[in-house]
Image (cartoon, coloured by chain):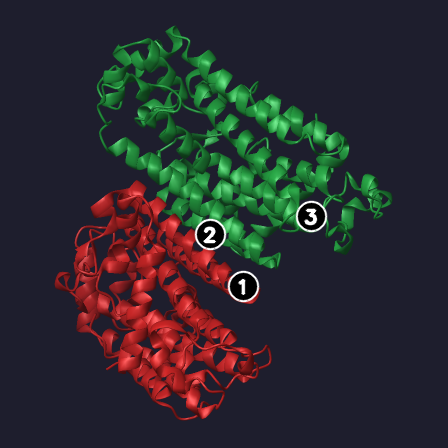
Chain colours: A red, B green
Amino acid sequence: MDSPLLQTYISQLQGQLLDDLCTSVPALTELYQYYVRLQSKRLRPRLILLMAQATNGLGSAWSKKQCLPGPLQVEENDCSLNQSGLANVILPEQLRLAEVIEMIHVATLMHDDVIDESPLRRGAPSAPAQFGNKQSILGGDALLARALMLSASLGVPEVVTNVASVLSTLVEGELLQAQDTMTPVKQTSDDESRKPGSSDWDSYLKKTYMKTASLFSRALSCTVILGGATESDPLRDIASEFGSQLGMAFQIVDDILDFEGGEAMGKPVTADLHLGLATAPVLFALEENDEMQQLVDRRFQEPGDVQRATMIVKSTNALPRAGAVARAYAQKAHDALAPLPASPAKVALQCLAMGVIARDH
Amino acid sequence: MDSPLLQTYISQLQGQLLDDLCTSVPALTELYQYYVRLQSKRLRPRLILLMAQATNGLGSAWSKKQCLPGPLQVEENDCSLNQSGLANVILPEQLRLAEVIEMIHVATLMHDDVIDESPLRRGAPSAPAQFGNKQSILGGDALLARALMLSASLGVPEVVTNVASVLSTLVEGELLQAQDTMTPVKQTSDDESRKPGSSDWDSYLKKTYMKTASLFSRALSCTVILGGATESDPLRDIASEFGSQLGMAFQIVDDILDFEGGEAMGKPVTADLHLGLATAPVLFALEENDEMQQLVDRRFQEPGDVQRATMIVKSTNALPRAGAVARAYAQKAHDALAPLPASPAKVALQCLAMGVIARDH
């Protein structure tokens, strides 16, 4: 449950997003704002805002920073340079960062939905279903461009570089995954290759980091940089480590939900299998059921393969085992915050980390 | 004909582009480098490098800048702080800018080829024909991300903002054009609406500026900013005006060549008509042939429309008249450089401007 103050920030963020995606052409505005207007947990912005609340005032360069003006002036009394009193303050630059990261996330969703030919997004028609592929490709590009313009407006070169790297790594992760679905699986007689630590797992975990965790990690690192954490400040490692572990947990849970979710949740089921992807549940099922290997080898492309693979995953311990891996990452995220002083935002971040593994959509 | 020094810079640029698009995964490197390896005039980098040569040493903040080290040390004797002797010097930041702008250009070509389903690019299979749509969409995103990382590495926030704006405006121009091909043409009885200055022309010229001229203008403006032109320096307006006028000339010639080029040049003919677009030649033909209006109104979508429209354009004075408009823009570009002191680079830029209207591919 968000604090009333966080709710205010999230509303302010939504307003900023809509404002910054407004154009003089109504049809373009509709396209740019389309995914931002859909219901969303706003996980990435929420993490950034909470991390700001949990760490602002602790960084070495804090005293140079200004607090957020405008609608939040009611919080002015939190805005002293007293460290412990600063726990709730979010800098305007950090709110802008949350906006930038959400815009990049939404832009990549738009391109993903073209690539995967997804008819639905968050229970509504996907952008390509609503506007066509051409508009969705260009719309995604426009969102990326606007996100990068906004990040440049922060005037902190390190943050711009990080934001551009977020995009680069994320796309490279998607590309590696795409390559993977096109090249045949390497045949191997070595059982080790089917266990965590093996090359299948290495490759899966690497792509998971690139696709999802890297964005969480860098975004949170930027949050504390904007909060005044200088290069040697341990806050940077804490924020980055928390983001990285949480991102891994989040993506693995996403891969589990691909087997458990339903059309009603706004996503088609077993989308990954249809794409030929072997995620954590499949990698665990491989260890328990010999039939799975041939399905993986042919990328679930023959009639009935997806249904058969789903059945195998559900009849083995694959899903609980994948859940345990996600839980271990979430726990590491939780523990990464231990060095931070106690604050409601720290607790909220830790709850959020543990909550990721309990989510059902 | 390039000077030997410019040729050296262009080779250096090509090397940098290939280096910066190298990854640890050969298949990704092949995708990223694919369009950079195709034959190209490298118009945008060439303009940037020549503008650097024509203006470096003139800007107010010049004395703070460093000259390009490395393979070009043979030019060291040009590298004094004597203004007139600096005409050939290009800063490493300006070479990097040329790289960034070419990368963005190539990224948008990749997305365009997916959108337009183009089988060919510069006479070779297009990226989507070679790698598929998925790889080409993600590949374009990856190129954009790398371009923006490189621009951030310049450490000049104004340049990063400009580079991101280039992308934003360019994509918005494409989107406006895409919208245009989907909404029916406004019927009008007002003859004025069919002449330059009318709303059809306004819309065409605005999209031409956004799609092409804006990139030329901002890229050249960034060139002199990196060369030390401070905010009030008239060099900024000169560079930006030259780019803007040249970009208009270039795009209009492109639209003319769409009627005159051939498959042999590596482009399909009348691609614009197939997309339903009324460019300068069509807008002029409208004034001379009443039949054209109905073809425009139905976006050349009925069988035989494209052939009929092509015939009308070729049988009227539309192409020479569009050529005259392009020539006028090129002349304005030429004249915009008048205030610059005489130099081989200035002459080369002016020749390049006038050469744009004589190009045949």
Who's the residue at 35% across and 70% down the image?
A44
Question: Which residue carries the number 2 mark?
Answer: B142
Q: Chain of mark 3?
A: B
- Taking B97 as reference, is A318 above or below it? below
Please report the residue visible at 38 percent of the width from the left and 31 percent of the height from the top.
Answer: B118
The residue that appears at 41% across and 50% down in the rendered structure is B138
Q: Nearer the viewer, residue B133 or A130?
A: A130
Check disc 1 and report the residue beneath it: A155
Give neighbour class at mark 3: few <14, some 14-19, many 20+ (Cα, 10 Å). many
Earlier sequence position, callout 3 versus callout 2: 2
The amino acid beneath tag 3 is Gly
Query: From mark 1 to mark 2, how far is it between C-alphas?
Result: 23 Å
Residue for badge 3: B227
Check whether the beta carbons of the residues at disc 3 and disc 2 lie within 8 A of each other: no
Circle 1 SS class? loop
Same chain check for tags 3 and 2: yes
